[in-house]
């Protein structure tokens, strides 16, 4: 009897130990699986965040669209348009690069009707397919005379210095050169609102 009792005690003790070990194992497995899930979530979070940033990147850069830049002074301008580079800090998904070229514009003097100093500003991007428009003595296809015109080196469109197409009926571009809002302040500084526009459309649609 005493032998059986001792054996029962041993068995109970063993069972208690087994249960305790089993509980400990379960607890460890649970902790490991929670840790694993946490690490998996962290590993997934990085590409998801990067993907979201890349998807939103154009929206983030919209802050530059329509922003006003001081590019030169009225006294530094001529009647004939000249190119001016527009610089700004550009941020991609991870880094900010200072003083990057975000565009180029044509500027020339064009006084206001009341005689106060004014400027005309145009995009240098051809509205047809995006080539960089040049300015210089060019044969006017309507008159055959050589005069100062904007011309596109890609498909030959020509534009007057006010941006209008010389021959709308024969132009590849469906609209005039894109003008930009510009002003001269009381100290003579010239400010331009830089803007890109959709290509290949007759409407002037900011992008
Ligand atoms: S890109 Fe200028 S005429 Fe085609």
Image: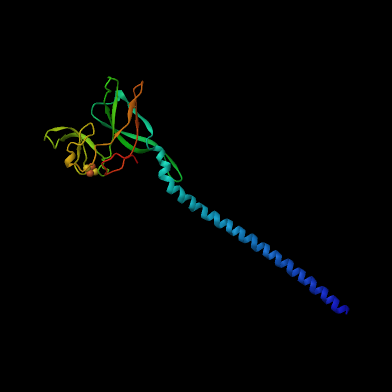
Above or below, 149 relative to 42: above
- Location of residue 141 by image quarter: top left
Residue 101 showing in the rendered view: yes
Image location of residue 206, percent across then percent down: 33, 39
Above or below, 85 relative to 55: above
Image location of residue 55, percent across then percent down: 43, 49
Name the residue nearer the viewer: 189 or 128: 128
Q: Quadrant of ligand 1?
A: top left
Left or right, 121 with respect to 100, comes to: left
- Location of residue 189 by image quarter: top left
Colour logic: rainbow
Left or right, 13 with respect to 31, comes to: right
Residue at far right of view: 2
Image location of residue 19, percent across then percent down: 73, 68
Residue 98 showing in the rendered view: no
- From the image, which quarter does the N terminus lie in? bottom right
Q: Name the residue at 82% across, 77% down.
A: 7
Name the residue nearer the viewer: 42 or 120: 120
- Location of residue 80 by image quarter: top left
- From the image, which quarter does the C terminus lie in? top left
The image shows a total of numbered marks equal to 0
Q: Name the residue at 34% across, 31% down.
A: 192
Residue at far front of view: 203
Residue at far left of view: 144
Q: Name the residue at 85% across, 76% down.
A: 5
């Amino acid at each position: 009897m005493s032998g059986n009792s001792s054996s029962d005690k041993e068995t109970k003790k063993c069972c208690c130990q087994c249960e305790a070990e089993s509980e400990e194992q379960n607890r460890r497995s649970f902790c490991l699986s929670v840790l694993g899930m946490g690490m998996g979530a962290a590993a997934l979070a990085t590409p998801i965040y990067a993907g979201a940033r890349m998807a939103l990147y154009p929206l983030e850069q919209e802050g530059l669209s329509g922003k006003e830049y001081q590019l030169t002074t009225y006294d530094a301008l001529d009647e004939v348009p000249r190119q001016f580079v527009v610089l700004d800090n550009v941020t991609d998904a991870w880094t900010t690069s200072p003083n990057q070229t975000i565009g180029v514009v044509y500027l020339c003097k064009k006084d206001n009707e009341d005689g106060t100093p004014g400027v005309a500003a145009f995009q240098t991007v051809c509205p047809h397919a995006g080539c960089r428009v040049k300015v210089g003595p060019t044969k006017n296809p309507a008159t055959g005379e050589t005069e100062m015109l904007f011309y596109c080196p890609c498909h030959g469109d020509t534009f007057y210095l006010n941006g209008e197409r010389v021959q709308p009926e024969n132009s590849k571009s469906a609209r005039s050169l894109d003008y930009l809002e510009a002003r001269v302040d009381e100290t003579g500084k010239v400010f331009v609102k830089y803007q890109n526009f959709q290509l290949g459309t007759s409407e002037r649609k900011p992008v």
